[in-house]
Image: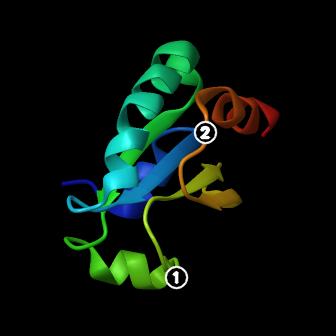
Amino acid sequence: MASFNDILASHPKVLIDFSAEWCGPCKALAPILHQLKENLGEEVKIVKIDVDRNPELAAQYQIQGVPTMILFKEGRQVWRQSGVLPKSQLEQVVRSH
């Protein structure tokens, strides 16, 4: 399995979705992220990370609530948001970086 740093290095823009199986809003976000990927294609890599299975990573990025999305550009954090956002707003965020 690829390490987190390998994932960040694998693509210029990586959107990390910190989520959990038990989280209702996370389930609502899933189809939005799927549509976002369809719209943006290769412009962004979207990765879902379960905070219960990756507690060290959640602690490292100080994830207090789920869903929390963090956009990395060339390995650097450039944007962060907790909660569900509409696809249009997410798309605007990714395109603006």
Q: Quadrant of the N terminus?
A: bottom left
Q: Can you give x and y, in whole percent of width and height, for residue 40 in the image?
A: 57, 19
The image position of residue 17, as x and y in percent, is 44, 52
Q: Amino acid at mark 2?
A: Pro
- The circle on residue 12 is 2
- Residue drawn at x 46%, y 73% is 65
Q: Which amino acid is tagged 1?
A: Gln
Q: Which mark is residue 21?
A: none
Q: Quadrant of residue 20?
A: bottom left
Judge whether 62 appears above or below 72 on screen: below
**35 vs 41, nearest the viewer:** 35
Spot occupied by residue 92 in the image (x, y as percentages of width and height): 75, 31
Q: Is residue 36 above or below residue 15?
A: above
Q: At 40% across and 26% down in the image, what residue appears?
A: 34
- Quadrant location of residue 44? top right
Left or right: 22, with 33 as reference point: left
Crowding at mark 2 (Cα within 10 Å: few <14, some 14-19, many 20+): some
**Distance of mark 1 from mark 2, alpha carbons?**
23 Å
Residue depicted at x 64% and y 59%: 81
Q: Residues within 10 Å of mark 1 (few under 14, many from 20)?
A: few
Locate the C terminus and report the quarter of the image it occupies: top right
Mark 1 sits on what residue?
Answer: 62
> Relative to residue 4, is residue 73 drawn left or right?
right
| Tag 2 secondary structure | loop
Q: Upstream in the sequence, badge 1 or badge 2?
A: 2
Q: Indicate the secondary structure of the residue bearing disc 1.
A: loop
